[in-house]
Image (cartoon, rainbow, N blue to C red):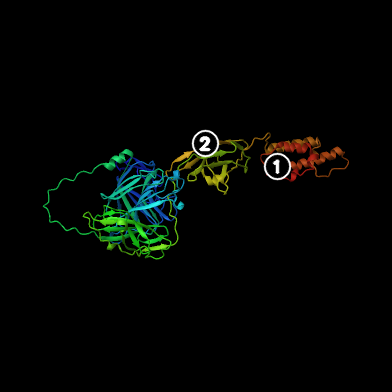
Amino acid sequence: MDTTGTITSFSSTPMSRFAIGGDIYGVQDASTSYSLTNPDPQTLRFEVQQGDHAWYDDSSVDRSEVSGAVNIAGSTPINLNYQFMVEANGPNGSFVNTADGWFIVGQMHNDDNASGVGTSPPFAIQLAGDHLQVVARYVAPGLDPSNGAGNVQMLTLWTDPNPIQTGVYNNIQIQADVSNTGGGYLKVSINGTQVVNYSGPLGYGQATNWEYGVYRSTAPETVAVDYRNMTLLTGAAATAAGTSTQPTTPTQPTTPTQPTTPNVAPTVTQASASPGTGTEHVGDVVTLTLALSEAVTVTGTPTLSLNDGASATYVGGSGTNTLTFQTKVASTDTSTSALAITGVNLAGGASIKDSGGLAADLSGAVKTFSGLQISPTTPTMPTQPATPTVTMPVLSVADNSLWVAGRGGHVDLGTTVSTTDPNDSVSLNIKGLPKYETITTGDGTTFRGSDITLSSAQVASGLTLTSYYRGSAHPVANLTLTASAKDPVTGAVTSSASQTITVTDPRPSTTSTGTTSLANQGFSHLHDRLGSDTNTLATNAPQTTSWAGHDTARTSQTSHSFALLNQYLAGSSGRVDGGQIAAAISNGAAWAQNAFLTKPHQ
């Protein structure tokens, strides 16, 4: 587990990996020069511009993150410590964030492969406008955790009432146990002050992994955040770190006693909403925060009265100067003033008092949030993609021994590749293809060379091997085929066992003679037919009718032999069966009755 935060083997290439204090993280960014940088051995800088997203995102997302490669089992104590800073991107050194949806800067990501569905993070550190915020989610055991199923319970546990300062590192400590069956908790301290102390169900009953950087709904402004000294402990080490005490501050000299200051009732210094701008939809949760002039203790369950007649219920903050309340947008909310706070309700004996017992002056809670818009539709929140896992690809070859005719001949390779994981990228590598053969895919793309790689789509379109062999031998090519599957996140590659296809080019024939041999055979047969009457070959005079029937047949066969010989010699057909000429001459009467001479032989 990570105990130092030192970054080694750094890489910013998507799907590559490097170590942070010994823990392995994978890169998920847009592969630009600014997406992910390593200013020093303890620091990572993340930047996104509109349109920057990882390979698996659509255009609605901007992302530059690193993701832990090892999942942490549920019901395991976790202790995270890091320093976080946002860089100025607005006027006068301000931070501007107009992302209308979400802006996550650190998240405990669910094992969506185990869940079988994409989910939103069980807990996240995020920005609502320019205010830091902590949210958590859970479902009851056995329920579908996808957003569309409607089972996810979302908790906005804390929103900083003050805008985040740019250029300043914030010390963030997170202690958690992601369990929805009992023992779950989330504690968050920022700059030494605990802002979240939640105990209850957390997550979806699956393992998790830590991701951090920038993950937002796309927005026009460029943003950059920096992390340094990131450490992660789990199990007993996390528990021990969480209970350790900080060094004691040396005692200062005693200051003379000052006159007692009269106790003044705490007052509401600010009322804010999160989100504070943008469009909210029916069913969306809005967190309302009251910042007070001093820490207060809450008794019972106070509520905030809202302009739409509903109320916001107290969530937490007792013992601090920040109280949070939550409400859901109702179907009857139609105007921007529907969520305005009209007062604080302390019914049922509820109270808000300081340490001296004085009740807080809550008149400053009344406020209208003019920047909030309300829409009657309920959008579906984008979900995190499941972390892909690489599986063994399957290579299938229909016939491991093929033959192909000579020049222009072709044969189907009968090869398929497949995988059980649709996220994997599958390919087929073929080695050993000779120079006189090519492979063509179903879309007409032709490949040459002794080492070629084809995509699964190209293989699925059908592969045809074509021969351009011109010789008279029968060469044999041994093609070696290997299928590979690549994990799109980690880049890990798994390959199938190789298979061999033997291709004989062309099929051996029982008789093979050249044009010269055919000519010699043709002349020989003609000589046999004509006997010693060699003058017949040289004369153009017509034959007389005094020839006997046998001589008439010989004349017909002789003419046929000339024609056949002439056709082969004129066409220079190359590889032919010399037996055809011999058969034609020996059986001239029979050959004269078929259409052999009319058939092309090229």
Quadrant of the image occupied by residue 555: top right
Q: Where in the figure is residue 595, as x and y percent of width and height?
A: 76, 44
Task: Work out which residue is located at the far top of the displayed protein and give it.
Answer: 510
- Badge 2 amino acid: Ser
- Position of 346 relative to 458 (above/below): below
400 vs 223, nearest the viewer: 223
Query: Which quadrant of the rendered structure holds the N terminus?
Result: top left
Q: Where in the figure is residue 403, as x and y percent of width and height?
A: 62, 37
Task: Work out which residue is located at the far right of the displayed protein and give it.
Answer: 546
Quadrant of the image occupied by residue 238: top left
Q: Where in the figure is residue 16, as x and y percent of width and height?
A: 40, 44
Taking the spot 83% from the left edge, 39% from the top edge, the residue there is: 553
Q: Which residue is mark 1?
A: 569
Q: Which residue is mark 2?
A: 498
Q: Are marks 1 and 2 in contact (CB under 8 Å)?
A: no
Separation of marks 1 and 2 at Cα, in angstroms: 48 Å
